[in-house]
Image (spheres, rainbow, N blue to C red):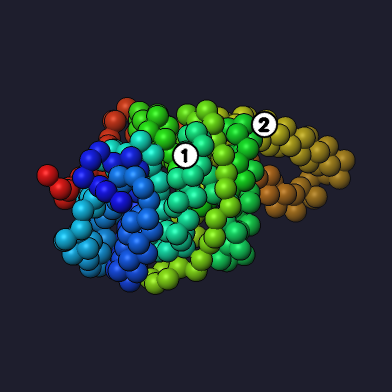
């Protein structure tokens, strides 16, 4: 309704090459926000788009109140963009959503209802999810994983239409972690989380910004960023591989003694197999250790999550 006082609600939207969706998004978003009886603001974070997204955002801003446009210096990724939006936002309630209209803006009042009931973290369950089977399968595994690690049982972490109280957002922002997965991190700071069903739609325009590679790297962030159990697996796998190597070595030695050296020439291949097995295990181990060390490195450098180029806001 009004938005000249300090906003009660902040809607944070990361945008990366979303020129095809900007117009429809803000049409629907501002229509919905207009029906809310509380002051709000919309914080749009342009995550280094290479298309016309920023220009379109600035045009949307003209003649509109309560719209903040943040321009990041380059593409930092969805979660860093949301962090930048969190930092700039001033509302007591913060709602994040995607720019591609897969999350219908019309669902926002229902999240506001949940805030009004005193919830400080509002997750959403996508009804009739419009994504590929592969994406749905990957999500199911991810959701289980986070539930196990955080001990908080929410059903769907993948939907970015979510609500966070100011306290939860401040908790998230205090985290110096270089890369993180916001919906999972939020569960550590929430006292009264809930989950509501929301509609899910096809992407309206443009294409998904997540390639399989990006999804895998998000998955790795999740696993290594939230628990140390990969290190423990490393230990077990290391032990088992080493033991297997030892046993195989003994078997080959025994066979060689029994069959004589004639057999051993063919055994060369077995040895190769053993070698590959062990070397493979070592590489696996090194890769994991490397990633943890990489994280320590990032944390020590305290490199910021994002770099702001410009913020466009009223006053
Ligand atoms: N996004 C972003 N930076 C990126 C990738 C994506 O800000 O590097 C934004 C994108 O513009 C969209 C949201 O994050 O608003 C979700 O991206 P997308 O729809 O491509 O993800 P999907 O729905 O396929 O999971
Ligand atoms: Mg999408």
Quadrant in the rendering for residue 99: bottom left
Q: Residues within 10 Å of mark 1 (few under 14, many from 20)?
A: many
Furthest residue toward right:
258
Q: Is 221 placed above or below 15 here?
A: above
Residue depicted at 54% across the width and 49% down the height: 124
Q: Can you tell which quarter of the image residue 279 is in? A: top right
The percent position of residue 70, horizontal first and vertical second, equals: 22, 50
**Which residue is rendered at x = 53% and y = 62% of the image?**
200
In the image shown, does 193 or 2 lie closer to the viewer?
A: 2
77 left or right of 115? left
The CA distance from mark 1 to mark 2 is: 45 Å
Residue 190 in view (yes/no): yes
Does 42 sit left or right of 229 as displayed?
left
How many numbered discs sit on the rendered protein? 2
Image depth: mark 1 or mark 2 in front: 1
Q: Which residue is mark 1?
A: 115
Of callouts 1 and 2, the N-terminal one: 1
x%, y% of residue 127? 60, 59
Do we see residue 75 in this rendering? no
User: Residue 236: which numbered mark, if any?
Assistant: 2
Query: Picture quarter containing residue 203?
Result: bottom left
| Residue sitting nearer the eye, 264 or 99 | 99
Residue 159: % across, % down: 51, 52
Please name whichever residue, 5 or 274, is drawn nearer the observer in this view of the structure.
5
Relative to 209, 22 lies left or right: left
Q: Secondary structure at mark 2?
A: helix
* Rendered residue at 21%/53% (across/down): 65
Crowd class of label 2 (few under 14; some 14 to 19; many from 20; radius 10 Å): few
């Amino acid at each position: 309704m009004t938005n000249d006082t300090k906003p009660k609600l902040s809607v944070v939207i990361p945008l990366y090459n979303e020129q095809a969706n900007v117009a429809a998004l803000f049409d629907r978003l501002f229509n919905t926000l207009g029906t809310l009886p509380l002051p709000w603001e919309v914080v749009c974070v342009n995550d280094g788009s290479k298309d016309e997204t920023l220009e379109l955002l600035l045009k949307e801003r003209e003649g509109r109140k309560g719209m903040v446009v943040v321009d990041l210096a380059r593409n930092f990724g969805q979660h860093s963009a949301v962090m930048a939006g969190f930092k700039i936002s001033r509302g007591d309630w913060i709602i994040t959503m995607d720019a591609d209209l897969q999350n219908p803006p019309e669902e926002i009042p229902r999240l506001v209802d949940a805030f009004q009931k005193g919830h400080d973290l509002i997750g959403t369950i996508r009804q009739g999810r419009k994504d590929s089977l592969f994406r749905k399968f990957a999500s199911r595994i991810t959701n289980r994983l986070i539930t196990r690690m955080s001990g908080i049982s929410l059903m769907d972490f993948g939907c970015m239409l979510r609500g966070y109280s100011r306290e939860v957002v401040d908790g998230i922002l205090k985290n110096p972690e270089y890369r993180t997965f916001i919906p999972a991190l939020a569960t550590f700071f929430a006292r009264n989380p809930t989950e509501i069903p929301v509609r899910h739609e096809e992407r309206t325009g443009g294409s998904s910004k997540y390639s399989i590679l990006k999804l895998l790297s998000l998955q790795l962030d999740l696993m290594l960023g939230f628990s140390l159990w990969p290190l423990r697996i490393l230990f077990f796998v290391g032990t088992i591989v080493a033991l297997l190597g030892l046993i195989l070595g003994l078997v080959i030695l025994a066979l060689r003694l029994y069959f004589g050296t004639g057999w051993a020439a063919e055994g060369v291949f077995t040895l190769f197999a053993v070698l590959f097995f062990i070397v493979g295990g070592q590489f696996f181990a090194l890769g994991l250790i490397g990633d943890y060390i990489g994280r320590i490195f990032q944390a020590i450098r305290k490199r910021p999550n994002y770099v702001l180029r410009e913020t466009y806001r009223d006053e």
